[in-house]
Image: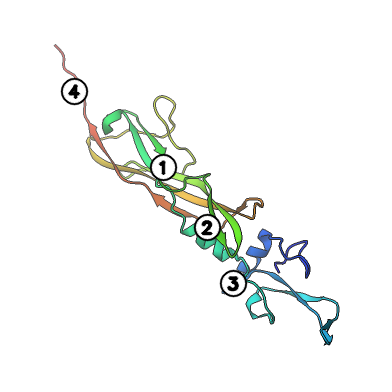
Amino acid sequence: MLRCAGNGPDHQEFICPNALSYCEKVEHVPGPWVFIYRRVDTGDNVYGPWESPGTTCYPDVLPGKHKPQLTLAMIEHAWSVTPFARPQLSIQPVNNRTLVTLPTYFQANWPVAGYAPGEVRPVTLVGHAVRIKPTLKSNTFVFGDGSTSGATKSMGGTYPSGDITHAYDAPGSFSTSVRTTYGGQYSVDGGAWTDLPGTTVVAGPAEPLRVLTSTTRLY
């Protein structure tokens, strides 16, 4: 059983993040971290007391019958195949047309499809109810002229309060977009949320923008 407080020969149901992640410190070791318990058969189906000689990260090589154990690798895989929401970009002025040197406002939006930050994906892994929750690490707004916003937690916004703006120095047609770096959390059997290691980057679709010049005429 998992090496968690409260687990023992007569109770094996507790799950703790440390037991799932501990064996990740050792390369090529699947884990999880488990207690070893044994007792001696003194004959005629009479057994001595349980003893615990230690713990191991190799539960599959222990003798005796045991049920499959939930591992952090299983949870990480479930997170990696989550259909993350692709961020959508909206631009102001409207109709994706702006003027040279005019501050242009950008805003990221989440579509209905996919799992956006904070939304929960339930999965069942070896009999356990596991919840996967994407988290927002950062957005990067791509302005199409070689510059970006850099990594930011902001979702941008509209005039006048939006904090993601860009002024173009020259007219032309530009391909703009936003990409999101996702992190993740998991919960097992209704337990507390625990951070997952690693991130993944999901790029949104390109949004064309036309930058025009304005002409002043005197009459």
**Residue 215: which numbered mark, if any?**
4
Residue at image x 41%, y 51%? Answer: 202
User: Mark 3 highlights which residue?
Assistant: 30
The residue lying at 61 percent from left, 60 percent from top is 128
In the rendered image, the vertical position of residue 156 relative to residue 71, given as above or below: above
Disc 3 to disc 1, C-alpha distance = 36 Å
List the residue tagged with mark 1: 112
Crowd rating for badge 2 (residues with CA inside 10 Å; few <14, some 14–19, many 20+): few
Q: Amino acid at mark 1?
A: Val
Q: Please, is residue 161 above or below residue 169 in the view?
A: above
User: Which kind of residue does numbered mark 2 sit on?
Assistant: Gly
Labels 4 and 3: the sequence-earlier one: 3
> What residue lies at 66% left-to-right and 50% top-to-bottom?
192
Does residue 201 appear left or right of residue 210 in this picture? right
On the image, the x and y values in percent for residue 51 come to 82, 76
The amino acid type found where label 3 is placed reads Pro
Q: Which residue does the numbered mark 2 point to in the structure image?
A: 198
Q: Helix, strand or loop at disc 1?
A: loop
Q: Earlier in the sequence, mark 4 or mark 1?
A: 1
x%, y% of residue 85? 42, 47
SS type, badge 4:
loop
- Element under disc 3: loop
Q: Label 4: few (<14), some or many (≥20) within 10 Å? A: few
